[in-house]
């Protein structure tokens, strides 16, 4: 039933006297005073615009469907009460976003400075003696000149290895620093400073004349830096390859669940890996489907309202009204027990409509592709100027399937995921690569991952990591954390992969041999 059942209590009037009128006026005055007090409470109500929903519960979405007959809109109320502390917190988050960009550039600048210091230190060890005391240096023999070639190639290898490992494009901006990166940076800095201290005390102050020893000292520095780079590969890349934990990722709105195996990672890096998997594995989040289910639940589970006209003053009338209201509520509860039948038939009707729209869409698309095949067969007979490219062919056949496609997308609540431009581009792509109608319809019949759709559905989405423990600590058995964005959140729980004990059982090959004895006499 579409309307809400409302039951009003009954009151018995003994007469219409002035006292009853005064009593009604006093009750109305009290109601007005109570409403004024409720309006005087300190609260801020913000109506979020449809284009930018503030919280995940808001379901105001308007889709511009100019490519069909009419425009469709899924509307609903979107009011959220925010306190002053929430507004201060939102302002602080905006300021933190500016600080994250600053921190990223500062980190990159520090890494570049440290890399230049590491690369130019061995060269400085070789050049400074020729500048400060060239007349005292001993001549460099063949072995010394061979060390020059060794230093040059090792520095080139070190430069390429550092560029490949540390100067890759950033995939994300994490809330905390990477502990192993900081550890390696501190180790390299202390290592280079210790080499400089030894060089300044034993070589610069003493003005060492053995230039071959100085060259060997620079070679030892380059060798040590190469070993540190190998340590960085082990800590940053190889350590996390072996799976140690099985994480369960569940979307909070619709319960979509996936499981992944992860290695020894910190919580923030595990969250980054889960978000990357989310964009590729999870179907796109569709709030329109959630709003439809909420409306059905609200309609079938609507509460009952009971009004008492006399108020709390008339005890006898209130008792009679209460007993009658209880009887009505019990009758309504018995009738409401059959609401699951209505829900069942509604879902069956919706599935029937989806199958009907799908059949019409399939027929329309097959006819359009048949027309394209006919046009391709006639192309050799046409003049060169009359031949259409795939984009023009897609625009020519799109109107024949636009109505059926739009009705299907509206029925399945996908109209906000596909625009006319994106559909025509996909159609032109299918025509160019000689795809079948089934290949064209696959993107619309089944919801795909988030990256399959336009950038406005995933580009610039900001995630918030919520964890009870430090995000730099490693994953443990039973760790739980949340990845929250505007529309929904991902609940992540981790379980440690158990230790597997495997034993071997030897089976003697002779144990499989048997003898078949046939009796010479047969029964008559």
Image (cartoon, helix red, strand yellow):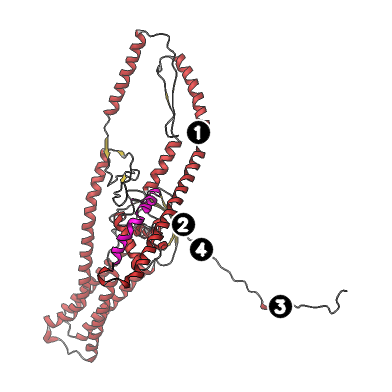
**Callout 2 touching callout 3 (CB < 8 Å):** no
C-alpha gap between disc 3 and disc 1: 71 Å
Does the magenta segment cover residue 398?
A: yes
For the residues carrying marks 3 and 1, which lies nearer the camera in this image? Answer: 1
Upstream in sequence: badge 2 or badge 3: 2
SS class, disc 4: loop
Q: Answer yes or no: is residue 474 visible.
A: no
- Residue bearing mark 1: 336
Q: Nearer the viewer, residue 488 or 450?
A: 450
SS class, disc 2: strand
For the residues carrying marks 1 and 4, which lies nearer the camera in this image? Answer: 1
Upstream in sequence: badge 3 or badge 4: 4
- Range of the magenta residues? 387-416
Query: Picture quarter containing residue 60?
Result: top left
Q: Position of residue 346 (x, y in %)?
A: 47, 42
Q: Image check: 300 left or right of 94?
A: right
Task: Kindly report the secondary structure that dominates the magenta region of the rendered protein.
Answer: helix
- Residue bearing mark 3: 513
**Callout 1 touching callout 4 (CB < 8 Å):** no
Residue 495's disc number:
2
- Residue bearing mark 4: 499
């Amino acid at each position: 039933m579409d309307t809400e059942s409302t039951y009003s209590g009954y009151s018995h009037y003994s007469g219409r006297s002035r006292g009853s009128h005064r009593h009604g006026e006093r009750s109305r005055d009290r109601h007005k005073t109570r409403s004024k007090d409720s309006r005087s409470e300190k609260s801020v109500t913000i109506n979020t615009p449809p284009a930018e929903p503030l919280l995940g519960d808001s379901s105001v979405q308007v889709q511009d469907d100019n490519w069909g007959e009419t425009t469709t809109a899924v509307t609903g109320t979107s009011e959220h009460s925010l306190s002053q502390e929430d507004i201060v917190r939102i302002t602080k988050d905006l300021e933190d976003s500016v600080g994250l960009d600053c921190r990223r550039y500062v980190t990159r600048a520090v890494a570049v400075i440290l890399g230049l210091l590491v690369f130019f230190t061995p060269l400085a060890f070789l050049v400074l003696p020729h500048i400060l005391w060239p007349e005292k240096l001993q001549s460099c023999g063949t072995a010394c000149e061979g060390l020059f070639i060794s230093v040059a190639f090792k520095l080139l290898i070190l430069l390429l290895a550092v560029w490949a490992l540390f100067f890759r494009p950033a995939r994300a901006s994490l809330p905390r620093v990477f502990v192993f990166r900081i550890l390696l940076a501190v180790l390299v800095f202390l290592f280079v400073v210790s080499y400089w201290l030894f060089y300044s005390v034993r070589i610069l102050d003493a003005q060492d004349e053995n230039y071959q020893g100085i060259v060997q000292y620079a070679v030892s520095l380059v060798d040590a830096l190469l070993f540190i780079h190998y340590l960085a590969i082990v800590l940053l890349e190889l350590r996390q390859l072996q799976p140690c934990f099985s994480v369960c990722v569940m979307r909070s709105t619709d319960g979509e669940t996936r499981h992944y195996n992860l290695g020894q990672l910190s919580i923030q890096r595990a969250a980054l890996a889960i978000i990357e998997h989310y964009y590729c594995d999870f179907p796109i989040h569709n709030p329109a489907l959630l709003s439809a289910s909420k409306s059905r639940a609200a309609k079938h589970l609507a509460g009952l309202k009971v009004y008492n006209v006399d108020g709390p003053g008339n005890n006898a009338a209130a008792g009679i009204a209460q007993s009658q209201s209880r009887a009505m509520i019990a009758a309504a509860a018995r009738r409401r027990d059959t609401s699951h039948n209505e829900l069942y038939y509604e879902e069956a009707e919706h599935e029937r409509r989806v199958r009907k729209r799908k059949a019409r869409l399939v027929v329309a698309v097959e006819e359009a592709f048949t027309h394209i095949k006919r046009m391709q067969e006639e192309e050799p007979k046409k003049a060169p100027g009359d031949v259409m490219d795939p984009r023009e062919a897609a625009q020519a056949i799109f109107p024949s399937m636009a109505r059926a496609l739009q009705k299907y997308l509206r029925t399945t609540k996908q109209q906000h995921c596909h625009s006319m431009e994106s559909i025509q581009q996909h159609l032109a792509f299918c025509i160019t690569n000689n795809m079948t109608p089934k290949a064209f319809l696959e993107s619309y019949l089944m919801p795909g991952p988030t990256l399959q759709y336009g950038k406005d559905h995933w580009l610039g989405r900001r995630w918030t990591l919520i964890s009870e423990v430090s995000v730099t600590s490693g994953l443990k058995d039973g760790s739980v954390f949340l990845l929250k964005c505007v529309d929904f959140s991902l609940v992540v729980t981790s379980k440690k992969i158990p230790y597997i004990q495997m034993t071997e059982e030897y089976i003697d090959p002779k144990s499989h041999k048997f003898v078949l004895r046939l009796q010479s006499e047969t029964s008559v």
